[in-house]
Structures are given as C-alpha cells and as structure tokens.
Amino acid sequence: MAHQIPTARDVLDFLNARLAARGLPYRVEELSVLPYVNPMWLANWDAPGLATAAERDIVDEELREARWRFPQIVE
C-alpha cells in the first residue's frame, strides 16, 4: 500500500477543529497550496485567511502544529 499524501481537506478539518477547541471565532475556508511537493519537506501550503487574526500567538501556534503534522499536501 502506497503512502498517501494528505489533502487540503485534512488540514482544513484539523485547523478548524483546533481553532474551535480554543474558542476562537476563526475558520479556514481555503488554503493556498503549491502545485508540487517540496523536496525539502517545507510546508507547501498556507492559510492566508488567518493572516489578520488578532490572536497571533495562538493562531501561529496552531499553524505550526498543522504544518508539523501536514507538511506536504495536495489539493
């Protein structure tokens, strides 16, 4: 069985569950995903909808956790 690369939906579900668990009003509706898997295993996605969130420390912590769990995704 081949290893399956996670999808953007996996990240959206994870981030939105984490944000809800922290009682934050933000939900991520879409991600910006690069069209390739980065050979350096840097995250190939971003959540631009969270860029203006007021609780930067909490949001950044959740983004770091999501990028650690899902460094490479497909759409």
Image (cartoon, grey):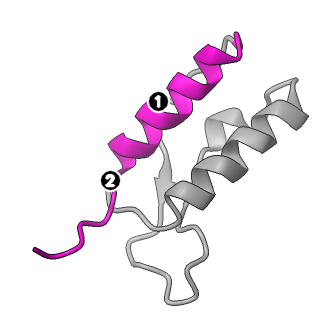
Instruction: State which quadrant residue 41 falls in.
Output: bottom right
Instruction: State which quadrant residue 74 falls in.
Output: bottom left
Q: Secondary structure at mark 1?
A: loop
Is residue 51 highlighted in magenta?
no
Q: Which residue extends farthest left? A: 1
Q: Which residue extends farthest front? A: 1
Q: Are there few (<14), some (14-19), or many (20+) residues within 10 Å of tag 1?
A: few
Which quarter of the figure is the N terminus placed in?
bottom left
Residue placed under numbered mark 1 in the picture? 29
- 32 left or right of 63? left
> Above or below — where is 6 with respect to 41?
above
Return the residue nearer the eye: 45 or 64. Answer: 64
Q: How far apart are labels 2 and 1 at the CA level?
A: 14 Å
- Magenta residue span: 1-24
At x 59% / y 27%, what residue is drawn?
A: 18
Residue placed under numbered mark 2 in the picture? 7
* Residue type indicated by callout 1: Glu
Q: Are there few (<14), some (14-19), or many (20+) residues within 10 Å of tag 2?
A: some
At x 87% / y 34%, what residue is drawn?
A: 56
At x 53% / y 65%, what residue is drawn?
A: 71
Across and down, in percent, residue 67 comes to 60, 57
Return the residue nearer the eye: 36 or 67. Answer: 67
Give the label on residue 10, or none.
none
| Between marks 2 and 1 in the image, the one whose residue lies nearer the viewer | 2
Which quarter of the figure is the C terminus placed in?
bottom left
Across and down, in percent, residue 45 comes to 53, 59
